[in-house]
Amino acid sequence: MQLSHIAIWTKELERSREFYTTYFNGKSNEKYVNPKKGFASYFVTFEGGASLEIMQRIDITKERDGLFIGLAHFAFSVGSKEKVDSMIELFRENGYTVLGEPRTTGDGFYEGAIADPDGNIVEIIA
């Protein structure tokens, strides 16, 4: 089996699409719109085949504070410790929140973490 995609809700669909295509070299499909449901989405596909479905619906606007049952984080492997370091700095320079400075974790990953435009935790790993 292979992971196909992860889906996330966003309040600003175009902003999220730009974030993942710009920083993670994702390739986006054409926007899907279902006006009856007030729903729109993009699939952004990454090297290796996994995709992120970025979704927006007019009745889903409430943000969640703190921890909740559901998505904890997702990670992009960038190939080297140096690339992890440089990407964390790029996010910092571009005004994104750095949630975790680059370090080697107990499970052996070298990683840093940032918040995407909607506050989702994205790990950058080597």
Image (cartoon, helix red, strand yellow):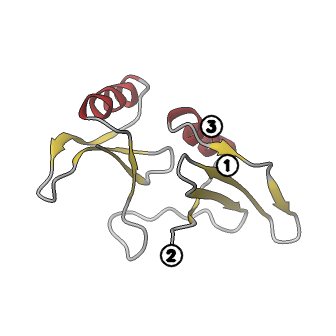
Q: Label 2 sits on what residue type?
A: Met
The percent coordinates of residue 80 (x first, y second) are 29, 35
Q: Is residue 50 left or right of residue 104?
A: right
Q: Is residue 78 left or right of residue 18?
A: left
Q: Are marks 1 and 3 in contact (CB under 8 Å)?
A: no
* CA distance for labels 1 and 3: 9 Å
Q: Label 3 sits on what residue type?
A: Glu
At x 88%, y 70%, the residue is 36
* CA distance for labels 3 and 2: 29 Å
Which residue is labeled 2 in the image?
1
Few, some or many C-alpha atoms within 10 Å of disc 2 (few <14, some 14-19, many ≥20)?
few
* CA distance for labels 1 and 2: 29 Å
Q: Secondary structure at mark 1?
A: helix
Few, some or many C-alpha atoms within 10 Å of disc 3 (few <14, some 14-19, many ≥20)?
some
Q: Which comes before the other along the chain, label 1 or label 2? A: 2
Which residue is labeled 3 in the image?
18
Disc 1 versus disc 2: nearer the observer: 2
At x 50%, y 34%, the residue is 23
Above or below, 56 relative to 82: below
Q: Residue 41 occupies which quadrant of the picture? A: bottom right
The percent coordinates of residue 42 (x first, y second) are 71, 53
Q: Which comes before the other along the chain, label 1 or label 3? A: 1
Q: Secondary structure at mark 3?
A: helix
Q: Label 1 sits on what residue type?
A: Leu
Q: Is residue 126 left or right of residue 120?
A: left
